[in-house]
């Protein structure tokens, strides 16, 4: 195992959790080949220092808190973090409608400027929420659909 590659990954992981894909890309960017990166990533995984499932859960939890979005948006965020498309899509699909709606209502409660109809409309349109979720959100906010 390449000690320099291992130390480089440890330095990256001190800053924040990363997916194995992110680390592989960083290693390649530093000139480390597969012969160096594969054993390093395997060892980091064995030590519990990288765990893609944990990273996925953390990303989704953080995203739903900071700025909720629909499943397509959540999938895109995961893919940007290096989670393969099918895994990202499956992970986003596991989040219930209720969880997403509650996250939106909590977000609006913390950011009351979104109660202004123009902002709320823009937020809901840009968030990629499914029509049924938007209807549920509006009803729970006491906004008439008529």
Image (cartoon, rainbow, N blue to C red):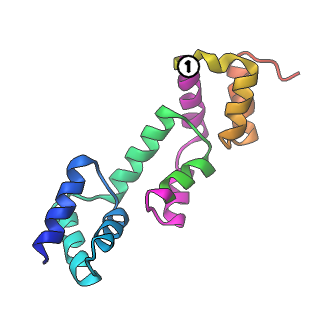
The percent coordinates of residue 4 (x first, y second) are 13, 70
Q: Secondary structure at mark 1?
A: loop
Q: Quadrant of the N terminus?
A: bottom left
Mark 1 lies on residue? 111
Name of the residue lying farthest toward the left: 3
Number of numbered discs overlaid on the protein picture: 1
Query: Magenta span has 82?
Result: yes
Q: Nearer the viewer, residue 15 or 107?
A: 15
Quarter-wise, where is residue 28 in the image? bottom left
The percent coordinates of residue 89 (x first, y second) are 56, 58
Query: Magenta span has 89?
Result: yes
Q: Quadrant of the C terminus?
A: top right
Quarter-wise, where is residue 43 in the image? bottom left
Can you say whether 97 is above or below 115 in the image?
A: below
The percent coordinates of residue 19 (x first, y second) are 34, 60
Q: Nearer the viewer, residue 123 or 58?
A: 123
Quarter-wise, where is residue 41 in the image? bottom left
Give neighbour class at mark 1: few <14, some 14-19, many 20+ (Cα, 10 Å): few
**Left or right: where 131 falls relative to 95:** right
Stretch in magenta: 80-109
The residue sitting at 62% across, 43% down in the picture is: 70
């Amino acid at each position: 195992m390449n000690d320099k590659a291992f130390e480089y990954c440890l330095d990256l992981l001190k800053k924040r959790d990363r997916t194995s894909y992110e680390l592989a890309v960083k290693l390649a960017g530093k000139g480390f080949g597969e012969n160096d990166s594969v054993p390093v990533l395997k060892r980091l995984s064995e030590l519990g220092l990288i765990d893609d499932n944990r990273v996925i859960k953390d990303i989704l939890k953080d995203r739903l808190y900071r700025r909720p979005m629909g499943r397509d948006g959540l999938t895109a965020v995961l893919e940007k973090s290096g989670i393969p498309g099918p895994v990202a899509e499956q992970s986003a699909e596991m989040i219930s409608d209720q969880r997403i709606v509650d996250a939106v209502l909590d977000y609006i409660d913390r950011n009351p400027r979104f109660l202004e109809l123009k902002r709320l409309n823009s937020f809901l349109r840009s968030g990629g929420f499914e029509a049924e979720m938007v209807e549920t959100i509006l009803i729970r906010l006491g906004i008439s659909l008529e």
